[in-house]
Amino acid sequence: MPDLRPLRDEDVAAAHEITIAAFAQFDAERGDDPDRPQPSPEGAHARIRHLMATDPGGCWAAVDAGDEPIGVALALVREGVWGLSLLVVRPDVQSAGAGGALLRASLEHGRDAHGGIILGSADPRALRAYHRAGFTMHPAAVAAGTPQGVEPDPEVVPFDAARDAEAAAEVDRAIRGAAHGADLDVLGASSELLALPGRGYVALRGGEVKLLAAADEDAARRLLRTALARANGRAEVSWLTGLQRWAVDVVVEARLELDVWGAVFVRGDVGPFTPYLPSGAYL
């Protein structure tokens, strides 16, 4: 069994490298696009350091005999909702116990949480582990392609924290049981944040929808259509479960291609979880 210790600042670059290697191997095994865009080191490092600051008890490294990281887990708790932001193990040492140990340590960080969220890849080992941890699985799809026939909504405008932050927090609490708080500030540093004032918001980066929360399905559709219209080329919308029919309607109308991939896992009280497209980093 590998040793675990808290993640340190000097581990940040290695944590990002392990993440890239783990997902590259998984993509290769599935025959997925080997040239898939990778997250920038700057954005990835900022995410890791942000969670180390807000949730030191949820940030863990599995290490080898030389104390070098071979696996990493990041977990957060926001207003009583726990989320698994990242769990990766270096490809050459997978299936040797590091993943399970990291998951257990991450779950301990949320032992008093009233709800939990995990966004799981299609890796069968991960799907089994999250089910065994008591989470309910909702198979998910990803939609990708060049949007057609979508127009931006004139009432969807750039997110203004002074005007929109509190409304966004209220929407989060109603939809997922907890506000994102300062996570939105970090996400906004590397993504474009848009708001339908008083009714919801969306984050997008390079055509990829990173997070969307709305008070009602009409607002959610307007935000998603605007995000697709602003993609300026290829768009991608992930974590489309059966709860998000409104989003499937929009991506089908925009002629994006659907592919089933991964699953959203929830347990406890996480609100209705719709209309909502979660964030991989901040859930």
Image (tube, helix red, strand yellow):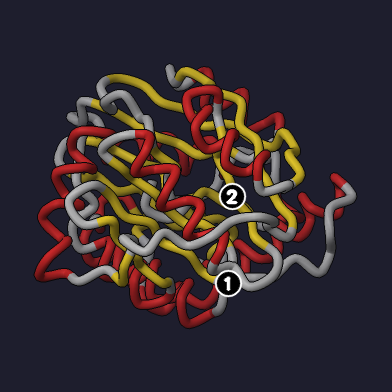
Say which of 125 and 181 sits in front. 181
Q: Where is residue 6 shown, x and y percent of the image?
A: 34, 58
SS state under label 1: loop
Residue depicted at x 28% and y 27%:
270
Q: In the figure, residue 25 lies in which quadrant?
A: bottom right
Q: Position of residue 20 (x, y in %)?
A: 66, 66
Three-letter amino acid code at the position of disc 1: Gly
Q: Residues within 10 Å of mark 1 (few under 14, many from 20)?
A: some
Instruction: Determine which of the numbered discs, if any, sits on residue 206 in the image.
Output: 1
State whether residue 64 appears in this view.
no
Question: Looking at this view, is 82 or 13 the one in front?
Answer: 82
Question: Helix or strand or loop: what does disc 2 sit on?
Answer: strand
Of the image marks 2 and 1, the number of the one nearer the N terminus: 1
The answer to whether any part of residue 167 appears in the image is: yes
Specify the quadrant of the image occupied by residue 202: bottom left
Give the camera-side residue of 201 and 172.
Answer: 201
Q: Which residue is mark 2?
A: 237
Q: Residue flagged by tag 2: what amino acid is it?
A: Val
Q: Residue at x 73, y 39 (%)?
A: 258
Residue drawn at the location 15% of the way across and 41% of the way down: 79
Left/right of residue 142 with respect to residue 276 in the rendered view: right
- Residue furthest toward the bottom? 42
Q: Residue at x 59, y 50 (%)?
A: 237
